[in-house]
Image (cartoon, rainbow, N blue to C red):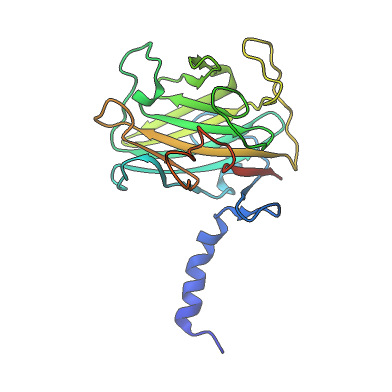
Amino acid sequence: MPLKAYDVMLILLLLPWAACQPTHSNKTDSQLTLDVPYGSPVIDGSGADAIWESTPWYPISELWEGTSVKPADFQGRYKIAWDENNLYLLVEIDDDTLTENTTPDIDLPHQADCLIIFLDEDASGGDPALNHNAFAYHLLLDGRVRDNASDSTWRTFDDHCWVRRITRSSTSTWEIALRVYDSKQYQPGAENIPKLLKAGKKMGFALAYGDRDNALQWESVVGNIKIASPKTNTPWQTADGYYWLNLR
C-alpha cells in the first residue's frame, strides 16, 4: 500500500528525533547505549568547537525525585565526546532560579543547585553507594566537585573535573573535561593515575540536575535515564540502569 503524503511528512518529522535517541545494546534488551564520538573540545564554556557541532543533543527530562518541573522552571540537554585523556560533556541547563550554597563551607550538595555526573568506569553495575564502584560527581555552582566517601562524608574531587560554566539570563552552559579512573583500583588520598581511553571501551553513565528554588533542599532531581522506582532504583543506589557509553 503506497504511503500517503501526510505519512511521508510524519516520517520526515520524526527522523531527527529518532537519530538522537539511545540505542539498545546487543547484550541485553534493557541496556541502552550511547555511541560517543571522538574529539577534543576547548573547555571554555562556549561550546564553540567542531566536535559539538556534529554531535547530537540528548535530553535531561526524566523525573527521579521530588515534584514535576515545568519547562519554564527547568529544561536540560547534553552532548558527549571523548579523547584518550578525558570524557567531555557539554550541558545546557535552563533554570529560572539559580541557588548557590547557603554558606561557603556547606557540606551538603542537595542544598544547592548542582549538576550530577554518574560514571561507572568498567560498566560493571552494582552498588555505587559509599564506594568508587561508580563515582557520583556533584558539580556545584561555586566550582567545587563533591562525592560521598566510604565514611559517609563529602569529599572534594576538583582534580577529576575541569569545568567552565557560562550563565546568560537563565541559561547556563557547562563544559566539562572528566578524567576517568579505574573503579576497582582507585584509592582515596593516593596518587591515582587516570586511565587512557580507547575506542571500543564501555562505561556506565548517567546525568542529572538537582534543582533547588525556594525549599531547603532540591525540590526536583531530573535525569537522563528512566528509573522504575524513586525509592529503590535511583543511580545513587544502583549502577545497573546506567546508559552504556560506547567510545567510537
Rendered location of residue 95, percent (x, y): 33, 37
Front-most of 62 and 37? 62
Front-most of 72 and 152? 152
* Count of numbered marks: 0
Q: In the rendered image, which quarter contains the N terminus? A: bottom right
Q: Residue at x 54, y 61 (%)?
A: 18
Q: Residue at x 38, y 26 (%)?
A: 110
Is 30 above or below relative to 213?
Answer: below
Rendered location of residue 116, percent (x, y): 48, 31
Among the 4 quarters of the image, the one containing residue 112: top left
Q: Residue furthest left?
A: 214
87 to the left or right of 228: right
Is 55 above or below relative to 194?
Answer: below
Q: Residue furthest front?
A: 232
Is 163 above or below relative to 125?
Answer: above
Residue 48 is at least partly visible in this image: no
Q: Residue at x 58, y 17 (%)?
A: 159
